[in-house]
Image: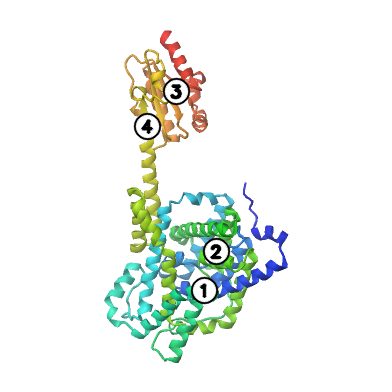
Amino acid sequence: MEKLKPKLFSVMKTYTKEQFMKDIIAGIIVAIIALPLSIALALASGVGPEQGIYTAIIAGFLISFFGGSRVQIAGPTAAFATIVAGIVASKGMDGLILATVLAGIFLVLMGLLRLGNLIKYIPYTITTGFTAGIAVTIAIGQVKDFLGLTYPAGTTTIETMEKLEAVIKNITSINWQAVIVGIVCLAILIIWPYINKTIPGSLLAVIAGICMVQFLHMNVNTIGDLYEISNKLPVFHLPSFTFGDIRDIMSDALTIAILAAIESLLSCVVADSMINSKHRSNMELIAQGIGNVGSALFGGIPATGAIARTAANIKNGGRTPIAGMVHALTLVLILVVLMPYAALIPMPCIAAILFMVAYNMCGWRSFVNLCKSSPKSDILVLVLTFVLTVVFDLVVAIEVGILLAAMLFMKRMSDVTDVEGWKYVDEEDDPDSISLKAVPKHTLVYEISGPMFFAAADKILHISVNEDTRCLILRMRSVNAIDATAMHSLEQLYEMCRKKGITIILSHVNEQPGKVMAKAGFNEKIGSENFCAHIDAALERAKAFAES
């Protein structure tokens, strides 16, 4: 069983001075990369710029300290931007704190219950759909600042569709100076990685944007024009709440927890492949929970493992959680010393950074490939999740997507589950085929194939018997699982046969169905002697009834 032990405690046994220096350098570089991203993601989430830094500091340190990965870097990510903005707009900061704390508790419980491996059961179509949807919502939300649009007082722009409508209605208010700044910053973000991969393009874009606005005296909104900038360290704040507040925020908290679990474990898997290591998924979930509770109580927003920052950490030599802790401590120094200068960053520059974040996360190639190569039912889940994320919100998208995927899965399993009389079977290459078996008189043999669960349970009741039938053999060699609904159907079949004086004989009952039947007392009803290990034994048993 996987250890519930932070990776930090394991790697310190063989820690060296050389690795310590590499971790420090990697941590500082990642902090420089995280600075503009944390500010941009905070603004996209509808909170102040410093709250993005708080998140990277508190959650980043705690998740590295307690985490199940050697190299995971945590902080605010684009996945949470739309849902956080919606919570802040409707329930305020106290509502966001409550939702994030509850999400953190859920994550800790998931780790303690060792549910880390269950995340793999979230269909790829759903994660691809809502990730692409989040990317589109982020991009739509940044059009206003990129174009320098101005909206009339009272314009509501909380939902994505409201933002899109406001952009269309006010497109004539475009500020061409803002567009120029945005295009220059976007060009730097696109081109610079091909020139130099060491210095973050986002940092150069910020510097270029500030220089353009300040030295060319361009009429462009900056962060300082729209937000109050604080370089104070985060302080503890516990909001007041009622049980009604908890009930109202529960769905948002569950969505945050699911997103944090999916994204953090996905980041861990990517990191494992880069350093040939293996993370502890359950410990990582516990760390994500602790980090989110800490972030919320100290003024931050939801956090999770960030794939891009984790990859940057690895590429710069980081190999232990020390690098993630150094990244958080470096951001503390940046917050205190440099945060006032963040007021100079132009809003089109922030929009350009978020455009690149949206593009990098959208996974359009995977989306198109799924549409070309997947079954129609999977395409339906993919497109519906994407559309619901954009048109409504992430909560609705995940709920409907998972529900639809589950229903389609059950439909597929039901389609492959079959209850068929032997008279329809004639397989020459099967040594156990009916063509090689002698079925006694007054005996019917039915072969059950596939898992017997509630969506297929009614097929058991479709078994028909003749007036002279004395024995009914159910061959279950291909039934690996059975649930309570299917067990109930078997009991109904037994009652029908008992009234007609028909004996049921079961052949080749596998382990899980056998345990379910024993627990339900079905063994006692039909008699243990009517459980046969092989079809030949079942036929011999039926022959004895036919001759008696």
- For residue 209, which quarter of the picture? bottom left
Circle nearer the N terminus (3, 4): 4
**Which three-letter amino acid code belongs to the residue tagged 3?**
Pro
Amino acid carrying label 4: it is Asp
Camera-side residue: 243 or 496? 496
Q: In this view, does 157 lie to the left or right of 245?
A: left
Q: Is mark 2 on a helix, strand or loop?
A: helix
Residue type beneath disc 1 = Gln
Q: Do residues under tags 1 and 4 come within 8 Å of each other at their CB atoms?
A: no
- Whichever of callouts 1 and 4 sits on the residue coming sooner in the sequence is 1
Task: Give x and y (percent) for residue 262.
Answer: 49, 57
CA–CA distance in space, label 4 to label 2: 47 Å
Marks 1 and 4: which is nearer the front? 4
Res 418 label: 4
Query: Circle 3 sits in a helix, a strand or a loop, which is it?
Result: loop
* Residue matched to label 3: 431
According to the image, label 1 marks what residue? 51
How many C-alpha atoms fall within 10 Å of the one at disc 4: few (<14), some, or many (≥20)? many
- Please give left or right for residue 180 compared with residue 482 in the image: left
Q: Which of 94 and 536 is in front in this view?
A: 536
